[in-house]
Amino acid sequence: MRLTVSKILPAVGLIFLMTSCTTSRMFTTLDILRPAQVTFPPEINSILIVDNSIAQPSNVGHYNKKLFEEYTSVEQVFDSASIFCTASLRESLEEKGFFKNVHMAKNRTNVSDKPFKITPLTSEAIKSLCAVYHADAILSLDRLLYIDKITENFYTDDLQFFSNLDIKMGTVWSINYPTDKPTTYLQFTDSFTWESSNKIRSKAGDKLPSRYNALVDASLLTGTNIADRMIPRWEKEDRYFYNPRNKYMRQAMDSVKVRNWKAAIDLWKLAAEKSGYATKYRANYNIAIASEILGDMENAILYCDLAIEIYPKVLFAFTVDMENDIYKLVSYKEDLQKRAKEINLIKKQLGN
């Protein structure tokens, strides 16, 4: 199907960092595969990016606000937002290697003069473009509108003047097929902020980029963000293992360091069987983490539930800081349940 399915198939990456701390916990970082917001049919190998938008007028969407004054509208010539956005999108998709081919249409397809109105591609245009570029689907940018504001403030706590440049990019997309597959419509908003400060009011905004350069950067970053939403992506998340002064728990951590998860789980089960409630809680929690790393969401949730069930019996043994662990544990269970549902979607998105 796609070029890099074999590279992104594992649900969880290996341990990259392991350190100890004063709370007797061992920390690790996982690579977790998250599903895309879009599920392309498995036969889509080649995609064409089309700019089907109209440039925003120079007298729309640009504002300044001086200290103690209202917003005023200003003019800024910038008619290349869609060009930067789609170019960045193409580059990001090519780097990720999810599709075998990522093409870019040479010209804008929308020739109207109404930037706020969406003019969908016709079925004839879709079929023609796919034939010309040998594409299986078209990712069309149908509208791109943005608002930028430069705001001046003074904060008495800092005794400094602040200037903020805020940009919101709103994009509307459609995924079109030359066949009878239904069109998918998508809408996103990306926000970006720059800040500069100084005790002298006239210098507070000196470190802000020019409005034009900020719009270029925002357009490029928007394209990158869109690519991240289109295909499954890796995210780094931190986890920790309890490492109390218990011989079975300590032996299990030796196995963790060499990624011998089966041996570690067996030792944690032994610790839970032969120890008090506090160790039972920690051992079951550790088994849940190890099960997640192994991609076994069913057992991860099972042992998470066991830890939650035991927690009230050992609350008295914990420090004040650890009393918050139950909230983290419940949140972790919710994450596991979410991941369990995501796995099938990810497999579908990968064509498995």
Image (cartoon, rainbow, N blue to C red):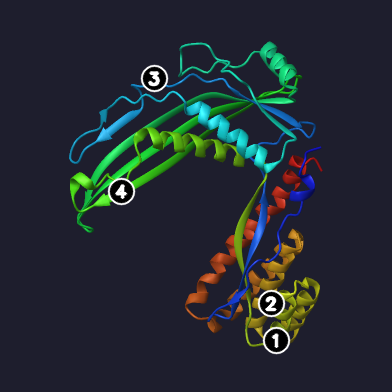
Can you give x and y, in whole percent of width and height, for residue 142 in the image?
Answer: 55, 22
SS state under label 3: loop
Give the CA separation, mark 3 to mark 2. 62 Å
User: What residue did someone put label 1 on?
Assistant: 275
Is the residue 334 above or below the residue 207 in the image?
below
Can you give x and y, in whole percent of width and height, for residue 51 in the image?
Answer: 57, 22
Camera sees residue 230: no
Of the two numbered discs 2 and 4 on the same chain, state the one appearing first in sequence.
4
Q: Nearer the viewer, residue 252 or 207?
A: 207
SS state under label 4: strand
Residue drawn at (47%, 25%) of the image: 80
Q: Are marks 2 and 1 in contact (CB under 8 Å)?
A: yes
Is the residue 6 above or below the residue 1 in the image?
below
Can you give x and y, in whole percent of width and height, for residue 309 in the image?
Answer: 65, 71
User: What residue did someone put label 4 on?
Assistant: 196
Residue drawn at (49%, 18%) of the image: 54
User: What residue did someone put label 3 on?
Assistant: 57
Q: Nearer the viewer, residue 276 or 47?
A: 47
Of the two numbered discs 3 and 1 on the same chain, state the one appearing first in sequence.
3
Number of labels in the image equals 4
Give the image quarter of residue 229.
Answer: top right
Can you give x and y, in whole percent of width and height, for residue 323 in the image?
Answer: 51, 74
Give the CA separation, mark 1 to mark 4. 56 Å
